[in-house]
């Protein structure tokens, strides 16, 4: 009987390594992936690191095969994206920014959340902020599509899918504060 595939899409990635230290670190990361002890954005970042290592070191002597399972993008919800934002936050891109950003997401899977960027950190809160510097209103699926790179934020704004109130300059810089896609 043929083994059933997991619900998630599986990728087989071969990493070619020369240094034992790198191999040990990679084995540790693989163990974390398999046990589920990994941070929300770490899986995607880990896969990219593995692919980059493979490209750079394709001529090396050793290979370590492993399976990488990714959640299908269609199952990613607005809540998933919002809750992962602190992990995707790039403090170096938001130097000097102290702001509260309100997300009002409509439709299926929508809700109200706000993020606070202050002193190089990013935190997520459910509900409505007392005072937001900028408020972004859109459909929950459009928010997911922007976060995953399927929809350009500027095009969403120009077409009316994304409504912005408050500090427009801050709104235009938001995507640069986070690793996207």
Image (cartoon, helix red, strand yellow):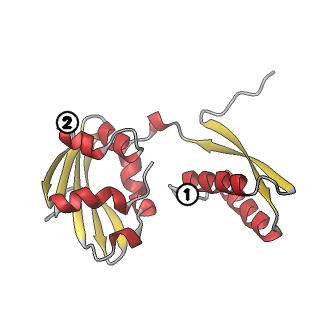
Nearer to me, 27 or 53 = 53
Residue at the image point whose x is 58% and y is 58% from the top = 38
Separation of residues labelled 1 and 2 (CA atoms): 33 Å
Q: To which quarter of the image does residue 107 belong?
A: top left
Q: Quadrant of the N terminus?
A: top right
Residue at the image point whose x is 60% and y is 33% from the top = 7
Can residue 33 be seen? Answer: no
Q: Are marks 1 and 2 in contact (CB under 8 Å)?
A: no
Q: Residue furthest right?
A: 61
- Drawn side of residue 76 relative to residue 36, left or right: left
Between disc 1 and disc 2, the foreground one is 2
Q: To which quarter of the image does residue 86 belong?
A: bottom left
- Residue 75, position as x, y percentages in the image: 46, 36
Q: To which quarter of the image does residue 11 belong?
A: top right
| Nearer-N-terminus badge (1/2) | 1
- Drawn side of residue 2 relative to residue 116, left or right: right
Residue at the image point whose x is 66% and y is 51% from the top = 51
- Residue 139, position as x, y percentages in the image: 25, 38
Nearer to me, 89 or 61 = 61
Crowdedness of circle 1 by 10 Å Cα count: few (<14), some, many (20+)? some
- Residue 13, position as x, y percentages in the image: 71, 45
Nearer to me, 43 or 79 = 43
Q: Residue furthest top?
A: 1
Residue at the image point whose x is 42% and y is 52% from the top = 180
- Drawn side of residue 41 relative to residue 21, left or right: left
List the residue tagged with mark 2: 159
The vertical placement of 118 against 43, above or below, is below
Mark linked to residue 26: none
List the residue tagged with mark 1: 42
Mark 2 secondary-structure assignment: loop
Mark 1 secondary-structure assignment: helix
């Amino acid at each position: 009987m043929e083994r059933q595939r997991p619900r998630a899409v599986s990728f087989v990635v071969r990493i070619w390594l020369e240094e034992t230290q790198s191999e040990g670190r990679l084995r540790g990361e693989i163990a974390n992936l398999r046990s589920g002890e990994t941070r929300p954005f770490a899986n995607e970042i880990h896969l990219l690191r593995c692919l980059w290592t493979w490209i750079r070191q394709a001529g090396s002597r050793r290979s370590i095969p492993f399976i990488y399972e990714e959640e299908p993008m269609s199952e990613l919800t607005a809540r998933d994206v919002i809750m992962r934002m602190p992990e995707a936050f790039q403090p170096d891109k938001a130097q000097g920014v102290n702001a509260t950003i309100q997300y009002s997401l409509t439709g299926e899977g929508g809700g109200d959340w706000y993020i606070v960027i202050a002193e190089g950190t990013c935190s997520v809160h459910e509900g409505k902020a007392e005072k937001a510097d900028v408020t972004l209103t859109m459909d929950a699926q459009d928010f997911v599509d922007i976060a995953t790179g399927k929809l350009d934020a500027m095009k969403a704004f120009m077409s009316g899918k994304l409504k912005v109130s408050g500090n427009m300059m801050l709104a235009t810089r938001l995507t640069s504060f986070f690793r996207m896609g």
